[in-house]
Amino acid sequence: MFSKILIANRGEIAIRIIRACKELGIKTVAVYSEADRNSLHLEFADEAICIGKARSADSYLNISSIISAAEITDSDAIHPGYGFLAENSHFAEVCESCGIKFIGPTPENIRLMGDKIKAKETMRKAGLPLIPGSSGGIKSKEEALNLAKRMGYPLILKAKAGGGGKGMRVCHSDVRLIGALLTAQSEAEANFGDSEIYIEKFIESPRHIEVQIVADGYGNVIYLGERDCSIQRRHQKIIEETPSPAVDGRLRKKLGELCVKGVKAINYSSVGTIEFLLDKNGNFYFMEMNTRIQVEHPITEEVTGIDLLKLQILIAAGEKLKIKQDDICFRGASIECRINAEDPEDGFLPSPGTINFCYLPGGNNVRVDTHIYSGYRVPSYYDSLLAKVITKADTRAEALKKMDRALSEFILEPIKTTASFCREVINDPDFKRGKYHTGFLEKFLSAKEE
Ligand code: MV4
């Protein structure tokens, strides 16, 4: 087992990782930027090291500073959290070559799933259904036009190195396709240093369903059900829930077993998430795989009773999975609302600043994962996630009621947050009935404007 883990992250996830380490009896090292001197993760860790200036590129993305911090403190592993270096195969490789365990899958697996074209091809071979589209990168506009003739519009262009909605373009005609291809290529080159684009049939109003998997290094793989992440704005998830109102026991088993096949095909080892689109007719398609622990992992923990962070660390340390698929039961329903420092009344404009006062909700089956406290200053350099409010109950309706109650107790002054906006969404009649898809928020917001 590891004796000391360096946490290469900040905010709520740094605290979440430190908590898991403490319960496992592992010492922790926090790293922080100059903008995070007043952060709680420094206080909760056994040691803390400043790794650079406020800008992420100078600190949380600075590989040599982080490796130096690990070496100085004699850390034997690094947990990357999510974002920053979590899916950087080069970073995982550097850790490996320095004799520091990267808590996550192998660099090869990260690289393979980072290439969205290769990821699709790999999962197709393993038996997962794909969205109809190009079988690889698009080499010319003739190729794109031929594909459009065969498949019909609408189509969506995606970057091979993209993911999470970055650099996507929907088009409805030949003229737009040619234009979109050129801009998508140059955007992809600028953003990812790789201009390759692939094309898919655009699925109208799908749900975003993702499956949590856990794999040890010994061929044991389990699935922990799905999360419905369809409530998103500009590819930022705001509310997630499990089980999905659109997934029944049969579909859950089918999705889960396919994911297990996919994960086994690449000898994956760690926690991971496989994303699907689910269309109106109940067809589902593999989209991409995330090789990190995700923001929304707590709702899966709530309904399975499994601590995903502890499991991820134990697996990285070489332990075998003790639980089998049959040991897992999904109990009740759980929902997560993301509280961001943003103003929903002003286009979700970031709202950084000092928190004069905050009160966090609690009570029966209410969980709040956060790093904020009264007096904390929210820096403007990083993502705006302040807290995750998670509720659990026997039924979805009760979990929603509990969320409404919990959010009503959330007090934060004076900065603006998404708390009351989340409350409006969960009280929407369509949302309450579980009738929603990835276009829900756009419609909800334009209806509010009127
Ligand atoms: C799609 C799609 C429809 N058809 N692909 C968004 C996140 C990234 N992982 C992929 N995403 C999508 N891919 C096909 N073939 C719909 C989405 C999508 C979306 C697209 C446009 C605007 C908002 C969206 C919200 C969620 C998902």
Image (cartoon, rainbow, N blue to C red):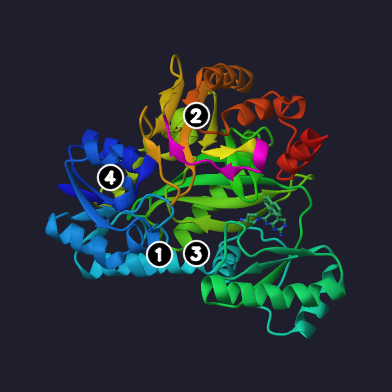
Q: CA distance from mark 2 to mark 4?
A: 21 Å
Q: Residues within 10 Å of mark 3 (few under 14, many from 20)?
A: many
In the image: residue 124, left or right of residue 50: right
Which one is closest to the eye, mark 3 or mark 2? 2
Q: Residues within 10 Å of mark 2 (few under 14, many from 20)?
A: some
Which one is closest to the eye, mark 3 or mark 4? 4
Q: CA distance from mark 3 to mark 2?
A: 41 Å
Using the image, tell me which numbered label, if any, was put on residue 37. 4
- If the image is split into quadrants, where does the C terminus sit? top right
Give the answer, above or below, for where 54 lies relative to 427.
below
Residue 369 image position (x, y, % from top left): 41, 32
SS class, disc 1 = loop
Which one is closest to the eye, mark 1 or mark 3? 1
Using the image, tell me which numbered label, if any, was put on residue 113. 3
> What stretch of residues is rendered in magenta?
345-355
Disc with the residue nearer the chain's start (2 vs 4)? 4
- In this figure, which residue is indicated by the disc labeled 1? 88
